[in-house]
Image (cartoon, rainbow, N blue to C red):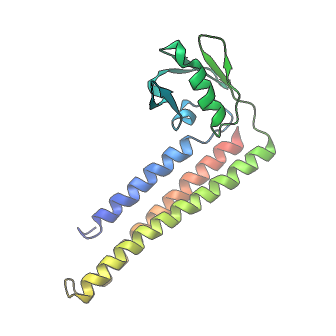
């Protein structure tokens, strides 16, 4: 890998990290505290991530328990969960909030996989956009004679290989998550 393509590889790796974050927030039938990562709670006028205002535990395979450090936050946490895309009704006993994850129906599994594939396509497009942006810059450099035509061809091949590698990684991660959804 040349110094020309390093910034683009870095961008592609960051895109993969973002994909991983997105995949971790998809609910698959068993309790995973990561599904709450995107949720924020109004904590004295500041939107604060849920995992920073309380303790989140998994006492059973399909249950999450959220125990806020300040019990006045129970209502705010409850509202944040209800307003989210989780599709789970929280139960509040005055001390903790329980989230019981129902078994996924076959229809819901298919819907999740369809959404997952769509998300995978979005990330593949993001990878291609990174390649395109790089190619645009290198074409301008070649026109200005800052790089030779041979260098341009070499960079183009390298950038394409990098893109192919990262697109394959996106597919691999989406397929793994799809299998995870189907196996539960």
- Name the foreground residue: 79 vs 131: 79
Q: With respect to residue 57, does 49 lie above or below?
A: below
Left of 145 or right of it: where is 129?
right
- Name the foreground residue: 161 vs 64: 64
The x and y percentages for residue 10 are: 33, 58
For the image, the number of numbered tags is 0
Tell me the quadrant of the picture where the C terminus can be found: top right
Q: Residue furthest front?
A: 45
Q: With respect to residue 25, does 149 lie above or below?
A: below
- Name the foreground residue: 77 vs 153: 77
Left of 142 or right of it: where is 126?
right
The x and y percentages for residue 154 are: 30, 80
- Name the foreground residue: 78 vs 109: 78
Tell me the quadrant of the picture where the N terminus can be found: bottom left
Left of 29 or right of it: where is 66?
left
Q: Residue at x 43, y 49 (%)?
A: 17
Left of 4 or right of it: where is 182?
right
Q: Is residue 164 visible?
A: no
Q: With respect to residue 64, does 108 lie above or below?
A: below
The quarter of the picture where residue 181 lies is top right
The quarter of the picture where residue 7 lies is bottom left
Q: Residue at x 52, y 60 (%)?
A: 123
The x and y percentages for residue 163 are: 43, 68
Q: Is residue 179 visible?
A: yes
The quarter of the picture where residue 166 lies is bottom left
The x and y percentages for residue 92 are: 66, 16
Q: Residue at x 48, y 64 (%)?
A: 126
């Amino acid at each position: 890998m040349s110094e020309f393509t390093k910034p683009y590889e870095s961008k592609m790796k960051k895109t993969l990290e973002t994909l991983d974050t997105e995949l971790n927030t998809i609910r698959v039938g068993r309790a995973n505290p990561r599904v709450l990562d995107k949720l924020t709670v109004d904590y004295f006028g500041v939107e604060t991530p849920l995992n920073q205002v309380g303790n989140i535990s998994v006492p059973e395979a399909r249950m999450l328990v959220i125990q806020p450090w300040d019990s006045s936050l129970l209502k705010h946490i409850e509202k944040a969960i209800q307003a989210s895309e989780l599709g789970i009704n929280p139960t509040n006993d005055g001390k903790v909030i329980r989230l019981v994850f129902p078994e996924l129906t076959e229809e819901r599994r298919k819907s999740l996989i369809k959404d997952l594939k769509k998300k995978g396509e979005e990330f593949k497009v993001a990878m291609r956009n990174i390649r395109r942006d790089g190619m645009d810059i290198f074409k301008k450099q070649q026109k200005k004679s800052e790089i030779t035509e041979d260098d341009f061809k070499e960079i183009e091949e390298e950038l394409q290989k990098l893109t192919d590698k990262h697109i394959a990684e996106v597919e691999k991660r989406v397929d793994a998550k799809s299998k995870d959804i189907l196996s539960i």
